[in-house]
Amino acid sequence: MLYGIILDSARDFIILSYGLNIWRRVVHDLKLPSDTFDLFTHYSENIILHISDCLADILHEGTRDTYLEYFGQDFFRYFNNFGYHKLFRIAARNFRDFLFVIDQLHDSNRFTFPQMRSPLFHVTEEDDTGITLEYKSVRQGFTHYAIGSLLGAAKTLFKETNLRLYIRNDLSTSDYTHIVLWIQFDNRTYQSQNLRNSSCLPNITGLTFFKVFPFSIVMDSSINIRYMGGNIKKVFPTTTIIIGRPLNEVFRLIRPDIHVEWDKILSYGQHIVFLMENRLPLRSGPSGRIRLKGQMKYIKNKNMLWFLCHPVLGSADDMVSAGLHLTDLNLFDGTSELLVTRMHQTREMENIVEKEKLCAAQLEYVRTQFLQYRKQNQNLLCTIMPKHIASMIQSGIPTFSLCESYPLVTIMFVSIMDLKISTAYLKPTQIIEILDQTINVFDDITEKYDVLKVKTKSDPSYMFAAGLHERSNISPKDFGLLMSFALPINDEEKTEKNLLGLNSTEIIAYLSFELLRANKDLINPMTRKPFGIKIGFHTGAAIGGIIGDQNLQYCLFGDSVTIARQIMTTGETDRIHISQTAYRNLVTNNRFAIEYRGQSDIKDRNMSGTYWLTGINKNASTTGINTTKKLLRCPYSGSLL
């Protein structure tokens, strides 16, 4: 598991480097439950690996390891936002010293991140050209994140630019990662230091030694306990024999994760924090526990190891479990002061945590509301313009750049006769009822077809358009660039493909028949008969675009719009009229019965006559058009309503 601060730093890097829309695509493609992370919450460590893979797929460059290294390099910049730059500033004088104190830095964060499973960085060799560093972790696949972190620390904290890092050896197993790294940089100021070369202790008596350091353990070269501070002895029963026993029988080494061997402990140097826990029962009971943390010192003249330590106490319960009292603690190491202060602040911290949880819950509620409102806004836009246009508008693309030309679209006008005259004699409630019924009937039918529906303002008529998927003024490259900035459309918002392969004119033709049949249920209260309806459509070129800044409207312009309206207005009631070009698009597949109407007064060189659409051929493969909604979908469903 990973703390959310690691994932949030990766999110921050993606937004800063590639933009917010790329992060939104990552969230959409991975189906992440949220586009933000709680800093102190645990998440699956696989999430950051999946994010890296997703970035490689979206950007088409690099691999998982490439982006893991980027995340690691940027982590120190992100961490500074929380005030940790002061901690880094006092951590070390140079990059060389920093490599020796990484383990201490991790340990210093144990109160902020108590369940952090930090990796181990251990310097094994060094010379004036660089350092050999071993990296160990229980996590798999994070090697390049660690490499990036080292490079980021060198560059961000110490302005070390002439640094190179190589993987010298991979000793990893199925249980943990173990990588030997060679870090090459100017290390001429190094001083060879390890436990053997450390300064020797002055000649002091054992009584004085253990009086000053009551929490300490001295071991011989066989790692057997030779001496032990009095305060550690107190926590064990008086009948338990400690002196002379191997350290590994009395205590379990937690950190570092190594075998308890003389050479191993010596090689890990004086910059590694050692942490061990009792194996034998304590005086406080079989469930009692004490943890000791400290530093190993080498006593050269005695060839012994001295573990200078103190108990790890986070609360009064830890003291009860270990069987300790405040009088047992060293006054000079600040443990008692920290413990008492922590006990006083426990309630305050609990209140802060509760407030944080409440704020997090409120934030999630606000986020849910925001997503709901954004979805409603997108759905509203999609009722007045194509989905791809609505998505790009919501992504912030200027409306003036969304003008498109369509080489072949089918435009249909539908006019309900006598509706405008009848409303002059009806009560307001009756007018509202009739209009509501009309709109609902037309909307229910239109929803099954991928067409754009526009309610005209001058009279009770509608305009429909199909075929808006064809674009001629935007190159595939430019359109792909525009769509890369658009908000992703959820799977449930995507319509299915047209299984029958209908062209735009055939889609409008089927729609016209359904509207003609549905109109029989729209009764005129004045005549007690269905309203008359005129339908006419034409196929040709058109231009579409957004008009207005505050009240956005998607409009179609061109001769095709004018011709389609004239086809409708000059037609007969309760009949479907089509133009010459629409006729050519319908006769190809022989799905419809068509009659020649005669010459038209419409002035257009392509208009040699008009036709009536009289029915659907029984032998056509689309006779089940009304029985399944799937058959009505356009193959370019992502472009239409």
Image (tube, grey):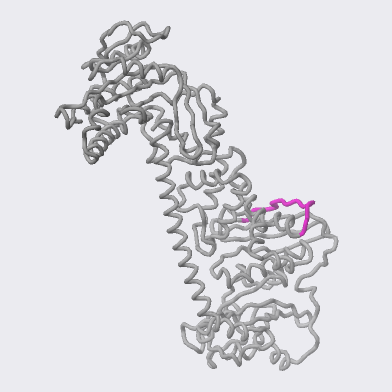
Q: x, y (%) of residue 530?
A: 18, 27
Q: x, y (%) of residue 607?
A: 38, 8
Q: Is residue 453 visible?
A: no
Q: x, y (%) of residue 581?
A: 38, 12
Image position of 26 (left or right of 178): left
Q: Nearer the viewer, residue 27 or 48?
A: 27
Image position of 153 (left or right of 510): right
Against 13, is 320 above or below? Answer: below
- Farthest residue toward the right? 188
Whether residue 168 is in magenta: the answer is yes
Q: x, y (%) of residue 189?
A: 85, 63
Q: Residue at x 39, y 27 (%)?
A: 635
Instruction: Give the magenta-colored segment's residue range.
Output: 158-171
- Farthest residue toward the front? 425
Identify the image quadrant of the C terminus: top left
Q: Nearer the viewer, residue 139 or 613?
A: 613
Q: Residue at x 27, y 7 (%)?
A: 596
Q: Quadrant of residue 417?
A: top left
- Farthest residue toward the left? 528
Q: Nearer the viewer, residue 553 or 501?
A: 553
Against 145, is 534 above or below? Answer: above
Against 262, is 146 above or below? Answer: above
